[in-house]
Image (cartoon, rainbow, N blue to C red):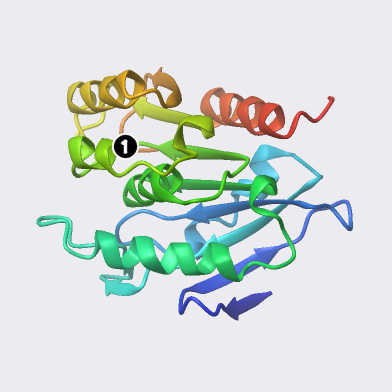
Amino acid sequence: MTQSSSSQLRTHFIPAEQPGQPRLMIVLHGLGDSLAGWTWLPDALRLPWLNFMLVNAPDPYGPGYSWYDINTGEGIARSRGLLFQLLDSIQDYPDEQIILSGFSQGCLMSLEVGARYPHRLAGVVGISGYLQEPERLITELSPLAKEQKFLVTHGTHDPLIPIEKVRGQIALLRQAGLQVDWREFHKAHTVAGETEISVIRKFVTACYAVKT
């Protein structure tokens, strides 16, 4: 079911295979993509107890959408506010039952929100992204940021976002006390198939302490 949320972000809800499940993964796409580009994820993760909410970024960009200006970073704070509103508007799922995830620009937004949102989420998953201002982020952490669980993955052959830069940024987050599980994959700017999906699946399952 596609809907417009009260946060002005267009969303698409994919219910869990098992009805009445209390867990939700929010998925944020990358630059020029849309929520339609991630409809494959539920089938790939194979977690029948997990609901999904795919989200479109607010700004048109090519055939899809953008969360912020890729050159200047302008719009990050605006999009972060919209995602705060989206989380606040979700009544059916408690914050501690929500995993926020994203790819590329969506990864950046997931990390931005996860580190600053004043309520603890079940977890945060960031794929092939980076941080715009990690030093500033560290000074603006929410009181619960160090309780959040983060999984951040990246490709050793990413031509768009060099891994060396991101390694340093993740090191800063860890030094600041954030719980970041950092994983590197032999890939470019993409998802490394089941090799990477299996790591995400295990992280998500552990966040919910679901017995498999």
Relative to residue 181, is residue 26 drawn left or right?
A: right
Which residue is depicted at the point 33% across and 68% down? 65
Q: Which residue is mark 1?
A: 189
Residue 101: image location, x then y, percent? 50, 46
Outermost residue to the right: 19
Q: Secondary structure at mark 1?
A: loop
Relative to residue 202, is residue 8 drawn left or right?
A: left
Q: Nearer the viewer, residue 112 or 162?
A: 112
Q: For residue 57, what is the image quadrant?
A: bottom left
Q: For residue 135, what is the image quadrant?
A: top left
* Camera sees residue 130: no
Relative to residue 97, is residue 101 drawn left or right?
A: left
**Position of 29 relative to 139 (above/below):** below
Which residue is depicted at the point 71% across and 31% down? 205
Residue 129: image location, x then y, percent? 32, 39
Q: Amino acid at mark 1?
A: His
